[in-house]
Image (tube, helix red, strand yellow):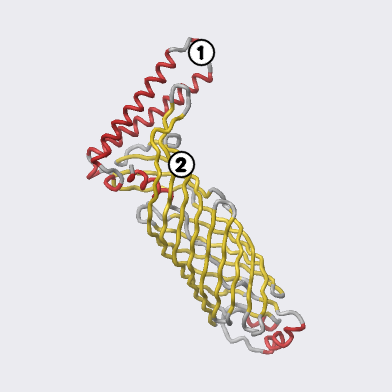
Amino acid sequence: MKKLGIFLTLITTLLSISFTYGQYTTDKVVGKKKTDLRDSLIRSEYPYMLPIWGKKVVAKGYNLPHSAGLSMQYLWQQSDILINNLQVGFNNGPKYNLDQIVRFDKATSTSSGINIRPDIWLFPFLNVYAIFAKSHLSTAINAGIYIPDSSGAWNKILPINTKANFDATTYGFGLTPTFGIGGAFLAIDMNFTWTDIPELEKPAYAFVFGPRLGKNFTLPNKKSNIAVWVGGFRVKLNSGTSGSLNATDLFPIDQWQSKLDTGYMKVNNAQQNVNAWWNGLSDAQQANPVNKAKYNTANNALERAGGFLDQASQVVSGAGNASVQYSLDKRPKNMWNFIVGTQYQINKSWMIRAEYGFLGSRQQFIGGLQYRFGL
């Protein structure tokens, strides 16, 4: 049963650790205390190729960050995931919909890893970047196998509580339009990532949208400042996922035949009880739409459970050459959560930042170091 739990945790481990954010924004220098800085910017000759229109905006009194950067960030997140439309088949045969039979009470995905992000300011108002990450993922699930009885109630016949761990590689790209004046800024971060887990048929796609509103505070050293911000974080996963696994990775063959026999017995007992209940009804009671729907629902579920056990039994008897195929739909329990963050700019080349996300069913933390240079 532990291996079955690992299978279920594998197919729920799909939340990318793609969230990231970098240099805050181009800043319009205003205020009497910054007159010298503004005048020096206007008089200076901007020496770099990027961003496009960089010379023009500096001549208007804007203070640009260095146009290229490289950051390394540690990322951690924990999120609840909802799973439905689970279908499982064997040896490339027909898949059985187990949505009612296998029920996920809770699935929690946790990931941590290192994110490398090169970026450039393509325009004074647009930062573009690439994402490369290595991460460790784990998913803890609380699930169960259910079958119906003659009353129409569903009963858990087998609980599944387990946790599995996986390693993943994430790659992608993003862009951050920004708007700033007088130290305040609005940054709208968007990135698109694909997370590759070897056991999945194809990489898992995620889209992250993170608007941030903040303020920059200049320190006595004019090249140093502190930025603080608040905002939101929204993640959308691709809804469908499928894959294939070797049966020997799922089934402890020396134990599963007895478990399958027990499963057959419980399904047969449930079928006998449903038939006895139905046959004990009068013709008028059998014609009642409520009883008819209850009877058909129970029979359909028990038929799917029996077919699943038949296929599983064949896999166990020839597990050396058997495979298991699956597909499912999944989504985060809450797509949005709240974020707060800060960045300390030591000078125009080095920055340290931290961000924390909370509320809803997701928590996350980002901490990193960034180096910037002219290009």
Between circles 2 and 1, the one closer to the viewer is 2
Q: Provide residue 179's location: percent of width, then percent of height.
A: 67, 70
Q: Provide residue 221's location: percent of width, then percent of height.
A: 64, 85
The numbered dot on residue 245 is: none
Q: Looking at the rendering, in which quadrant would you find the N terminus?
A: top left
Residue found at x 44% / y 54%: 204
**Residue tagged by mark 1?**
285
Secondary-structure class at tag 2: strand
Q: Which of 64 and 265 is in front in this view?
A: 265
Q: Provide residue 260's location: percent of width, then percent of height.
A: 30, 34
Q: Residues within 10 Å of mark 1 (few under 14, many from 20)?
A: few
Residue 52, quarter of picture: bottom right
Residue found at x 65% / y 89%: 44
Q: How many marks?
A: 2
Residue type at the position of mark 2: Phe
Q: Residues within 10 Å of mark 2 (few under 14, many from 20)?
A: many
How far apart marks 2 and 1 lie (CA) works out to: 34 Å
Q: In this view, does 1 lie to the left or right of 336?
A: left
Residue type at the position of mark 1: Gln
Residue 33, quarter of picture: bottom right
Q: In this view, does 6 lie to the left or right of 41?
A: left
Vertical placement of 373 versus 6: above or below?
below
Label located before the other in sequence (2 or 1): 2
Residue 280, quarter of picture: top left
**Residue tagged by mark 2?**
104
Residue found at x 37% / y 20%: 272
Q: Do the residues labelled 2 and 1 touch (CB within 8 Å)?
A: no
Vertical placement of 332 versus 171: above or below?
above
